[in-house]
Image (cartoon, rainbow, N blue to C red):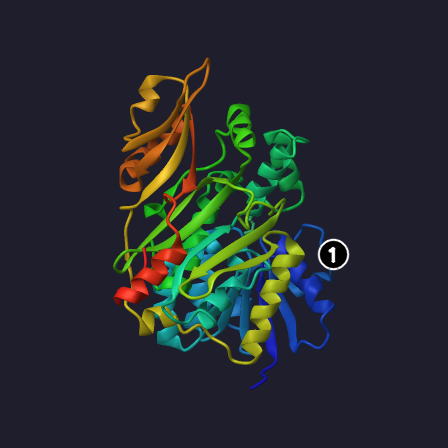
Amino acid sequence: MDTKQIIGLFGFGVVGEGLYNVLQKSPATRAEIKKICIQDINKPRSIPGEMFCTDYSAIIDDPEINLVVELINDAGEAYKIVKAALLAGKSVVSGNKMMLATHMEEFIGLQQQTGASLLYDASACGSIPVVRNLEEYYDNDLLLSITGILNGSSNCILSGIFNGNETYEQALSKAQQMGFAETDPFLDVSGKDAVNKLVILATHGFGAIAKPEEVFVSGIEKLNEFDIRFAKEKGFKIKQIGQATKLNGNALNLLVMPKLVPPDDYLFNIEKEYNGVVIEGAFYEKQFMFGKGAGGYPTGSSVLSDITARMHGYRYEYKKRKYFNIPELTNEVQIKMYLRYSNLIDFSYFEFDAIDEKYYSKPYNYVVGSINLSKLLPVMKLLPALDVFIAFFGRPEVSRKTETRKAFKTGEFVNR
Ligand code: HSE
């Protein structure tokens, strides 16, 4: 099957324009953009004006258009477009992670109902083909965890600060100028953008659909020079990490948090707008994927790959939901955490089970200890108002190797 894709494109921002140019440079691709729906028809554009329209129906009602590519910022408007397109029987390629994470279950239902297909590899980790790999290569129950740097802008900021050449503000402004940051960069630095991506990865990796607002998230906004000194003295870097971990029984934990990353971690050397994903499984232990996570061309290339996949009739089957037991989401997981604080009232919100290290000074103190994520969850909403920064080291050191071997020996298949 090789069906020419006649595309109706929504949005001509960084990624939309990136896709347009990528398509021009890929002449063998049997796909052509017929119309581009935009908000502001008067804005000067780099391509002929007759391509543009402002009315959704010019695309949705055009019978020749067989593929809608949705690349707009507004998740609410994107939802309306994608739903209308699927209901009109048109397949869709989208990069809108917030919309996808919020409406994942409904979109899976709409694809089944209409027979139209929705592809979105560009929505998580830009140019890294992680969604299709989780869906196809990892279509078994050996997957144990997915851990990644999922947001290019926060990684740019952390790189700029750690390499000592930029302040937080300078690095953020650079990420904005380069077109990496969201329109509201709070989504990048707060970890919320990474949560949306993690929800998408967990759907294809494990079959569980989490509600973004139920995933524990803390951001890098409160990071200061004290935290950086702490990390540097220990030989660590701080990276914003999203992690989905299979636990004992059929349970799954998702979290997004700054992490103190040691030099032997694959994610240690991921700098600037690059993303990296470490996939851990029984038998193969670790695999690693790396690539640009933000920017018009890298994301446009990923959209192009979904367009060519549609040329060949590709669709997601959501295999983990179809053929395996869907894991229960849980926050009953112990993590080792660094907490920097200034006053005891702020400290009192954190119920550590054990403290390994304490340090008092003026104006900053810190503790490193073990805490259960379920006890941290109620503090999540208070975090913006507290004068604290938290980062985790990972789950208490357990060797997956030993655990996996032990579990298979005893016939207990599911790992911690
Ligand atoms: N703002 C996002 C990032 C864009 O920085 O990763 C790509 O999803």
Residue 325, horizontal then vertical, whole percent? 28, 67
Q: Residue at image x 65%, y 31%?
A: 170
Residue 202, horizontal then vertical, whole percent? 40, 59
* Residue position for label 1: 46
Q: Is residue 58 left or right of residue 383?
A: right
In which quadrant of the rendered image does the N terminus lie? bottom right
Q: Residue at image x 37%, y 56%?
A: 402
Residue 331, horizontal then vertical, whole percent? 29, 46
Q: Is residue 270 left or right of residue 356?
A: right
Quarter of the image holding residue 84?
A: bottom left
Q: Residue at image x 26%, y 67%?
A: 411
The answer to whether residue 201 of the structure is visible from this angle is yes
The answer to whether residue 65 of the structure is visible from this angle is no
Q: Is residue 192 left or right of residue 351?
A: right
Report crowding for label 1: few under 14, some 14 to 19, many 20 or more residues within 10 A (C-alpha): few
Q: Residue at image x 61%, y 34%?
A: 162
Identity of the residue furthest to the bottom in this view: 1
Quarter of the image holding residue 146?
A: bottom left
Quarter of the image holding residue 288?
A: bottom right
Q: Nearer the viewer, residue 276 or 96?
A: 276
Q: Nearer the viewer, residue 245 or 218?
A: 245
